Image: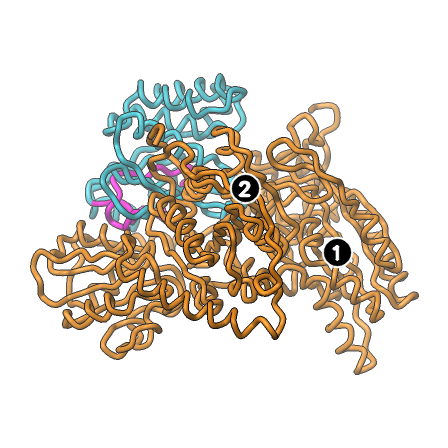
Amino acid sequence: MQLVIVGIGGQGILFASRVIGDLSIRKGLPIIGSEVHGMAQRGGSVISHVKVGPYSGPLVLKGEADLLLAFDQDEAIRNMDYLRRGGTSLVNVHDPSRLANEHLSSFVAERGLDLRTIWGYKLLKEELRLPFGYLNALMLGKLASLGLEPFDEEGMRESLKRVSPPKHLEANLKAFELGLRS
Amino acid sequence: MGFEEVRFLLGNEAIGRALVEAGCEVACAYPGTPSSEIIPSVEAFAEELGTKTEVEWSVNEKVAFEVALGAAMSGKRSATAMKHVGLNVAADPLMSAAQFELSGGMIVVAADDPGHHSSQNEQDSRFFAMFAKVPCFDPCSAQEAMEMVFHAYELSERHRTMVVLRPTIRVCHARQSVRVGAPRGFRREAHFEKDPSRWVCVPAHVGRMQRNLNQRIRAIREEFEGSPFNLERRARRDEGLGIIASGICFSNVMDLIELNGWDNVSVLKIGTPYPLPQRLVEDFVSRHRKVLVLEETYPVVELQLLERKRVMGRWNGFVPEQDELTPEVLEAIVCEAFSLRPSGSRESASLRRAVEELGIKPRRPVFCPGCPHRATMYAIKRAFPRGVYPSDIGCYSLGINQKAVDSIVCMGASSTVPSGIFLAHQVDGKEIPIIATVGDSTFFHMGIPGLINAVYNRHPYVLVVMDNSTTAMTGNQPTPASGVKPRGKQGGCVSLEAVISGIGVAHLEVVDAYDVRGTMRALKEAHERAREKGLPAVVISRHPCMLILRREDRRELPVRVDQDRCVGCRNCVDAFYCPGIAFDEARRKAYVDERFCVSCGVCEAVCPAGAIQVERGEA
């Protein structure tokens, strides 16, 4: 499993990759990935690479990712060429009209991609009245609902509990369950 | 070994872990991406494993280097860590102390940033190792970096030399499963042996020191011929195609070979780029028809090859001279060099068209919502629209978005470049307002000598010290003003005001960075005092970094943009540049983007039409 997590600095992308890492380690799978720190984190585009399996290098090659987990729709579009033929993309949307772009649709068809969306901001605000800082837990919940190996619901919930700072645990779990159901 | 377990660690955490396990007893650094997490990890693992390791944040890299040096001169295993440009600051002790015959092992971790993700250049620290004649390790992974730490200490003590460990950003910031264990270094007793011929670099001693240094590096070159970090992966089908790969390039190339099924390509992995094991490499070159050299960022291995003309590399344009060698770039180089084909499609014309049509660009880094620097930069630009704005290294470099940053060179240049700009104009009888910016941590690092120089030589300019009480860009390390030390120890507190007053500036005033109008007034006042006295003046604009302020300590002033009053002038968007304010192009109105707004309320002072209003009573 090779995945790329994209979004904007401050959205909690490092946290999400840490939860996925914990899950993989507990399943005894080797894992390697690459994070962004420093200047690149300050509200700019952020990309985190995660490779589960016997890989040597930390970076995912374009055209080889099984999954694109996107916290921002524009970042999703910009990075969709990381996906392999038949790959899955899970995108947090707030203005899905942009995803209807004609050229984008032909790209999705060319590569036979499975394009999933979630109204992350709306769900957090309307269903939970939670700040957008919990988007990562929501996205992880939605990811766990897709049935992609090795990201099962039980394991993901357990890893979220293990990685979550205690004071955010309750809200994280709420957001996770909402993502799972939506 | 007592125990072994697998953990999911950042490369820098793995290096920190290995330092503690290997018995490092003094570790110090100045933070800098991509090296910053090493010292906090030494602290965390020293706590976990119960070692006595002294861990410190130093004022700058030269200081850190010399503190670690003093410990190694006293028989302890020591380490210092820095980013590549940090080694420029520490170059002075590196070049001279390289000649020493140390008592304890010393590791200098110099973390490079190919692709300049968070740096002002792409220099290659392996060259510094070569320059100083100090052995250098180039790890291909976090796990290998750990193993290299143990080897480096062993080599360091056997040859009495310091050793450079040069991880690149993709090793430092890779997170991977690594094996950790119990401490295995034995404790060494502190003992400073008086021996001027060994520790005193004067001309009378240098001849012998240089002879030792040259003999030593020859012996290490010989030893590296058999180093476990240099190995050959032979192709299943030998067609005379070979790659020499140093550091992380090896890992990336191995993944490409596996993925694309290139079973006709052999790889010679180099983990010790200096001194290069000459026979090993020349033998590999002689056995292959086509040889490609892959390394980041400069051609350090390539330049040491005796028969460079036989290889494909940077000298003949096969490998790009700049930027990171990502898997995509590497794949293209290998395909071109060996006439091979990639197995999948990488980029797509239709996606490129979609991105173009939708106008999607990579998002530039910006000040965080609620960042005090944004307010200060705005005030500077407003108070002196025709000023010149030299700046410095740190978060505030992002003031470039507000056009309030005119130059950035290196740590501390904000207090020296203004002097030159002043002198140049003075020669021509011209006068321009010069408003320089520097952060608190950077001012302590290297800003002080420049300010002393400006007082001594009488250079009137305004230096704004943007005091957010932390070293923010690199992950909020404490500053000398805080008195906070690692491992729960209490440090002394160095007062910014006392230091600046002591230098004898024309004028010093402290303002709250959130107070835009107050800052503008203070800047004008400082400018007048500087002109009057012919000396630099300083404004400290103070407000804690949003990332260290607890939620309950933050100012809560929710704002709204009155859509009737908004005239669509874009001042709040272009000059204030906050993610919390967006602009509706269709309606030509600004609005609060609640995904990002943190209700600091500073933008109220920014709107010329009074449309940005604090929602009083509703919070």
- Are marks 1 and 2 in one subunit? yes
Q: In the image shown, does B3 or B583 lie closer to the viewer?
A: B3
Crowding at dot 1, Cα within 10 Å, few <14 / some 14-19 / many 20+, comes out as many
Crowding at dot 2, Cα within 10 Å, few <14 / some 14-19 / many 20+, comes out as few
Residue A155 position, x and y percent, is 31, 21
Q: Identify the residue under disc 1.
A: B380
| Residue at x 66%, y 35% (from the top left corner) | B560
Mark 2 belongs to chain: B
Judging by colour alone, the chain drawn in cyan in this rendered image is A
| Residue at x 38%, y 64% (from the top left corner) | B274
* Segment tinted magenta in the rendering: A60-84
Q: Is residue B421 magenta?
A: no
Residue type marked 2: Glu
What quarter of the picture does the C terminus of chain B occupy?
top right
The residues tagged by marks 1 and 2 sit, at their Cα atoms, a distance apart of 54 Å
Is B352 rendered above or below residue B280?
above
Judging by colour alone, the chain drawn in orange in this rendered image is B
Residue B603 position, x and y percent, is 70, 42
- SS for tag 1? helix
Residue B100 position, x and y percent, is 53, 62
Q: Identify the residue under disc 2.
A: B189
